[in-house]
Image (cartoon, rainbow, N blue to C red):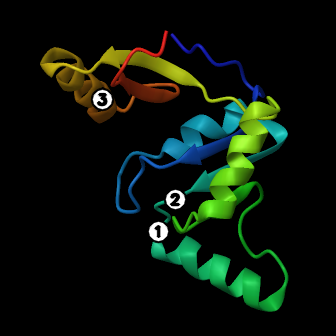
């Protein structure tokens, strides 16, 4: 059932979970991280955001081990850095499934997203590049 091996991931960027959710995605995915891996929450709860703020102000991490909370503030330089890492094959996305850009494909993609069981990105292909 579970396609990912324990200890196989360097980083998980969680842009799905919500701070008030009963689902504990972090607890489910953490075993998949390498010992040096990091779980990054883009929608962290207020307590985690406060710990992040305090950590930055005092110069010492008061957050739990392997966890980071981020606010989505990408800029041109960040995107250029990510693009260079992609070209150098330092990073690669984990893609769960690719759907067509049509009514059925988009409906199925949203159904998959809402199901919360995908193991990777859900992609809707707008145009074939091949």
Percent across and percent down for residue 40 are 63, 54
Asked if marks 2 and 3 touch (Cβ < 8 Å), the reply is: no
Query: In front: 53, or 105?
Result: 105
Check disc 3 and report its element: helix, strand or loop: helix
Q: Residue at x 33, y 25 (%)?
A: 126
Measured Cα–Cα span from mark 1 to mark 2: 9 Å
Residue 74 coordinates in the image, percent (x, y):
57, 63
Q: Residue at x 70, y 47 (%)?
A: 82
Please identify the quarter of the rendering in which residue 50 is found. bottom right
Q: Are marks 1 and 2 in contact (CB under 8 Å)?
A: no
Marked residue nearer the N-terminal end (2 or 3): 2
Q: What residue is rendered at 51% in x and 64% in y?
A: 72
Question: Which element is circle 2 on?
Answer: loop
Say the numbered circle drawn on residue 115. 3
Residue bearing mark 1: 45
Which residue shows up at 74% across the image and 83% down it? 56
> For the residues carrying marks 1 and 2, which lies nearer the camera in this image?
2
Label 1 – label 3 distance at C-alpha:
21 Å
**Could you tell me which secondary element the residue under label 1 belongs to?**
loop
Looking at the image, residue 115 sits to the left or right of residue 103; the answer is right
Query: Furthest-left residue in view?
Result: 103
Image location (x, y in percent) of residue 121: 48, 30
How packed mark 2 is, by other alpha carbons closer than 10 Å (few <14, some 14-19, many 20 or more), is some
Label 3 neighbourhood size at 10 Å, few (<14), some (14-19), many (20+)?
Answer: few
Identify residue for label 2.
42
Picture mark count: 3
State whether residue 88 is above or below residue 18.
above
Choose the circle earlier in sequence order: 1 or 3.
1
Residue 5 appears at what percent x and percent y? Answer: 70, 18
């Amino acid at each position: 059932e579970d396609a990912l091996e324990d200890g196989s991931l360097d980083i998980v960027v969680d842009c799905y979970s919500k701070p008030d959710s009963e689902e504990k995605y972090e607890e489910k995915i953490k075993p998949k991280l390498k010992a040096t891996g990091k779980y990054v929450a883009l929608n962290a709860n207020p307590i985690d955001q406060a710990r992040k703020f305090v950590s930055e102000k005092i110069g010492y991490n008061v957050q739990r081990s392997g966890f980071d909370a981020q606010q989505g503030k990408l800029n041109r330089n960040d995107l250029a850095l990510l693009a260079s890492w992609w070209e150098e094959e330092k990073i690669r996305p984990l893609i769960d499934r690719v759907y067509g850009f049509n009514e059925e494909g988009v409906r199925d993609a949203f159904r998959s997203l809402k199901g919360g069981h995908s193991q990777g990105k859900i992609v809707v292909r707008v145009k074939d590049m091949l």
